[in-house]
């Protein structure tokens, strides 16, 4: 069990960063810097296995303590919050170590490679006010997503009927030359897991629980273990039907979500982040003009970002409240990705809740299926 988090009232939240690569420099540090200006946070330490890299990182960012040993950092600095910015295969051990040390965790996606690993993380969380482990799903946050989520939840636009979720990006052979990419054990999955999970998570945040999925996947270009493209049909508990496309083969890159409701179509088109201007609401014929105008009022523009999510996470920490994108709320996106793979690799319809202990896909996203699993892990998969 994790040790109890110290009181967080009346002081800055002490944060530490694990991993000093591009995502830490480009997204996490700027988010912490902004909240530091507001008196909310301070980054007290960073950890990396490369001593020179972490020393340089700390010098450039004004971080007082550099470490190459995570356990030592946790024991000596006792941070309130740990930001995990390492490759996916390291997330489980690092998240568990931080939780056991009493730190809340903010972990980059994909959170962990399997549902079994996610369940192991949940087992380490406190059940009474934290610490908790949240996933970086920053596309849920910001004024646009908040406004549309409210409109759909309140049925202001009528029932959601048809949706489309698209992450069509482009990655060349040089991208996959990085040794840990394109491999199940180290990257966790292909574009469904490593790229499209953001838009799928946002779709779930808008529409609520999914009920079943039917999918296909392929390796059309890249010589990798994982897929490089997938498509899926998803049914939601509210009856809505959605198509999902995830690709790293698409020169004209775009991220898109479209939801057709009874009284309006809502569409978001962007690439790596969105603001109010990226959302469009088209009313159905006959909708009164004043009502349609009210739907267009997104309020002050707060773009989706690590900063927007971190601000909400910090508020949750101070209140001892489980943050969004943690626990069952965070698990639902990983469960959909897992079900997508199971459906694609076994040619079956997969229903929410069916993948648990004893199912080969619970412990490996390839499920041991011949042709998809590494040869050493190929297993007999029930029909």
Image (tube, helix red, strand yellow):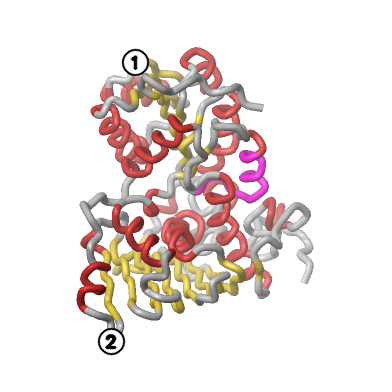
Circle 2 SS class: loop
Q: Relative to residue 167, is residue 214 drawn left or right?
A: right
Q: Residues within 10 Å of mark 1 (few under 14, many from 20)?
A: few
- In the rendered image, residue 98, in percent from the top left (x then y), is placed at 55, 28
Q: Main secondary structure of the magenta part?
A: helix
Task: From the viewer's side, name the closer residue of 81 and 47.
Answer: 81
Q: Farthest residue toward the bottom?
A: 285
Decide: is 126 above or below 149: above
Q: Residue at x 37, y 59 (%)?
A: 172
Decide: is 132 above or below 139: above
Q: Residue at x 25, y 73 (%)?
A: 291
- In the rendered image, residue 341, in percent from the top left (x then y), is placed at 60, 64
Q: Is residue 113 magenta?
A: yes
Q: Quadrant of the C terminus?
A: bottom right
Tell how many labels. Answer: 2
Classify residue 15 by image quadrant.
Answer: top left
Task: From the viewer's side, name the closer residue of 301 and 93.
Answer: 301
Q: Is residue 318 magenta?
A: no
Q: What separation in Å lies between label 1 and label 2 (alpha carbons)?
A: 60 Å
**Numbered tag placed on residue 285 in the rendering:** 2
- In the rendered image, residue 168, in percent from the top left (x then y), is placed at 38, 67
Q: Relative to residue 146, is residue 333 drawn left or right?
A: right
- In the rendered image, residue 218, in percent from the top left (x then y), is placed at 53, 70
Q: Residues within 10 Å of mark 2 (few under 14, many from 20)?
A: few
**Numbered tag placed on residue 64 in the rendering:** 1
**Numbered tag placed on residue 350 in the rendering:** none
Residues drawn in magenta: 110-122
Classify residue 280 by image quadrant.
Answer: bottom left
Q: In this rendering, which labeled residue sits more in front, label 1 or label 2?
A: 2
Q: Residue at x 75, y 52 (%)?
A: 357
């Amino acid at each position: 069990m994790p040790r109890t988090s110290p009181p967080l009232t009346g002081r800055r939240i002490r944060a530490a960063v694990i991993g000093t690569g591009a995502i830490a420099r480009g997204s996490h540090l700027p988010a912490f810097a902004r909240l530091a200006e507001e008196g909310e946070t301070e980054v007290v330490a960073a950890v990396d296995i490369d001593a020179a890299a972490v020393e340089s990182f700390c010098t450039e960012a004004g971080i007082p303590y550099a470490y190459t040993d995570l356990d030592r950092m946790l024991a000596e600095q006792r941070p309130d919050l740990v930001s995990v910015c390492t490759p996916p295969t390291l997330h489980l051990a690092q998240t568990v170590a931080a939780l056991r040390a009493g730190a809340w965790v903010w972990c980059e996606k994909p959170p962990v490679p399997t549902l079994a690993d996610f369940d192991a993380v949940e087992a380490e969380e406190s059940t009474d006010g934290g610490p908790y482990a949240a996933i970086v799903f920053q596309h849920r946050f910001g004024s646009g997503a908040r406004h549309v989520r409210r409109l759909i939840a309140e049925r202001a636009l009528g029932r959601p009927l048809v949706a489309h979720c698209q992450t069509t990006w482009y990655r060349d052979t040089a991208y996959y030359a990085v040794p840990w990419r394109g491999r199940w054990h180290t990257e966790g999955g292909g574009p469904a897991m490593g790229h499209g999970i953001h838009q799928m998570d946002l779709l779930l945040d808008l529409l609520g629980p999914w009920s079943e999925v039917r999918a296909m996947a392929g390796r059309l270009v890249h010589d990798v273990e994982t897929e490089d493209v997938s498509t899926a049909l998803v049914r939601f508990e509210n009856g809505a039907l959605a198509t999902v496309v995830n690709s790293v083969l698409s020169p004209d890159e775009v991220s898109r979500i479209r939801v057709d409701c009874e009284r309006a179509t809502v569409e978001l088109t962007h690439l790596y982040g969105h603001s109010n201007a990226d959302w469009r609401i088209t009313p159905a014929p006959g909708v009164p003009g004043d009502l349609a105008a009210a739907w267009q009022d997104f309020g002050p523009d707060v773009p989706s970002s690590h900063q927007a999510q971190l601000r909400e996470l910090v508020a949750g920490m101070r209140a001892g409240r489980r943050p969004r994108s943690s626990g069952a709320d965070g698990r639902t996106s990983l469960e959909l990705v897992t079900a997508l793979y199971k459906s694609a690799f076994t040619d079956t319809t997969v229903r929410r809740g069916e993948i648990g202990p004893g199912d080969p896909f619970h412990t490996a996203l390839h499920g041991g299926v011949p042709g998809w699993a590494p040869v050493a892990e190929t297993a007999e998969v029930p029909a």
